[in-house]
Image: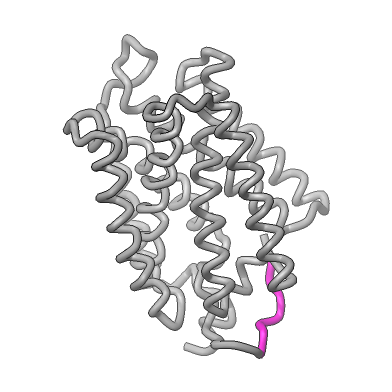
Amino acid sequence: MDTRTLAPTRRRSMLNKVPEVTVYFWVIKILCTTVGESFADYINETLGFGLTNTTLVFSAALVVALVAQFRLPRYVPGVYWLCVVLISVVGTLLTDNLTDGQGVQLWISTTVFAGLLGVVFGLWYARERTLSIHSIVTTPRESFYWLTVLVTFALGTAAGDWTLELTGWTPGTAVLLPAGLILAVFGAWRLGAGAVLSFWLAYILTRPLGANIGDYLALPKADGGLGLGTLWTSVLFLSCIVGVVVYLSVTKRDRTEVDRATA
C-alpha cells in the first residue's frame, strides 16, 4: 500500500523511520502480535509474575527501546521491530489490566480505545496534515506514530477478546473473522479505497488475528488449541521474527526507496 507524501522541510528531518509496507512487514507484524499475546500470558500467568509487575517490567523495557529508536536517524530493522514486539506486549497488558485488574467490561475498553485512537489520529492530522507512515521523517511525526501503534494494539486486544466473549468461538474458528476482514480491506484497497485508511484498518485487524493464532497454538487441546503452551509459542514466533529481521537487515528489502537511494 503506497502511502508516500512529500517530506517536510521544517524541524529536524531524518530518513523515513519505518519500513516499506511489503509482505515482510505484515508477516512480522502478525508474528509480533502473536508474541504479544503469548509472552504476556507466559510471564503473567505461567511464571506468576502478576499483571502489575509484568506491566512495569515491559513498560520499562519499551521506554529503553523507544529511546534507542528515537535517537536513530533512519529505520533500523532490529530496533524498530523490538519496539513493535514490546508495544504488542504492553498494549495487551493495558487491556488485561483494565479487564482482569479493574473489572472493566470489554465493550467499554473497546469503545474507549477506539475513541482514543480517533483523538490521536485527529491531533496527528491537525498538526502534520498527513497520516502516512511514509512521512515519518520528523520527531513529532514519529511520536504520533508510536502512540498510534500502542493504541491500536490495546484496541485490537479489547475488540478481539470482546468478539470471543460475544461469540463463544474457539481460537481456531476466531482466526477466520479478522483474516476475512483483512482480505476485505485488501480488496477494497485494490478497488480504489484510500491507502492510508486501508493501512490502518489492516494494522488494527492484525492484532486480533495474531492474538487468536497465539491462543490457538498455546491452549490445551481440550480447549480447542494445539497444546504448545505459551512458552513454546513465544519461542517459536520470536525465532521467526529474529530470522526475518536478520534477513531484512542484510538484504535491505524493506527500506523505502528514498532510504535506499540515500544509502
Of residue 252 and residue 96, the one placed in the foreground of this image is 96
Q: Residue furthest right?
A: 192
Give the residue displayed 30% in from the left and 33% down from the top: 41
Q: Work out which quarter of the rendered image holds the N terminus and state it.
A: bottom right
Residue placed furthest toward the top: 222
Residue positioned 28% across, 58% down in the render: 61
Of 105 and 161, the residue lying toward us: 105
**Residue reaching furthest to the front:** 102
Q: Quadrant of residue 114?
A: top right
Residue 91, given in percent of the width and then of the height, sits at 44, 45
Q: Main secondary structure of the magenta part?
A: loop
Count of picture labels: 0
Left or right, residue 230 beside residue 98: left
Residue 25 placed where, x, y %? 50, 57
- Left or right, 210 with reference to 256: left
Q: Is residue 232 visible?
A: no
Which residue occupies 42% across, 75% down?
A: 70
The residue that appears at 29% across and 57% down in the rendered structure is: 60
Q: Is residue 134 among the parts visible in the rendering?
A: yes
Residue 245 is inside the magenta segment? no
Q: Is residue 132 left or right of residue 244?
A: right
The relative height of residue 214 versus residue 256 in the rendered view (above or below) is above
Q: Position of residue 53 (x, y in %)?
A: 24, 42
Above or below, comparing residue 123 to residue 41 in the picture? below
The relative height of residue 215 versus residue 151 in the rendered view (above or below) is above
Place of residue 150 in the rendered image (x, y in percent of width and height, measured from the top left) = 49, 52
Nearer to the camera, 196 or 23:
196
- The magenta span reads 3-9
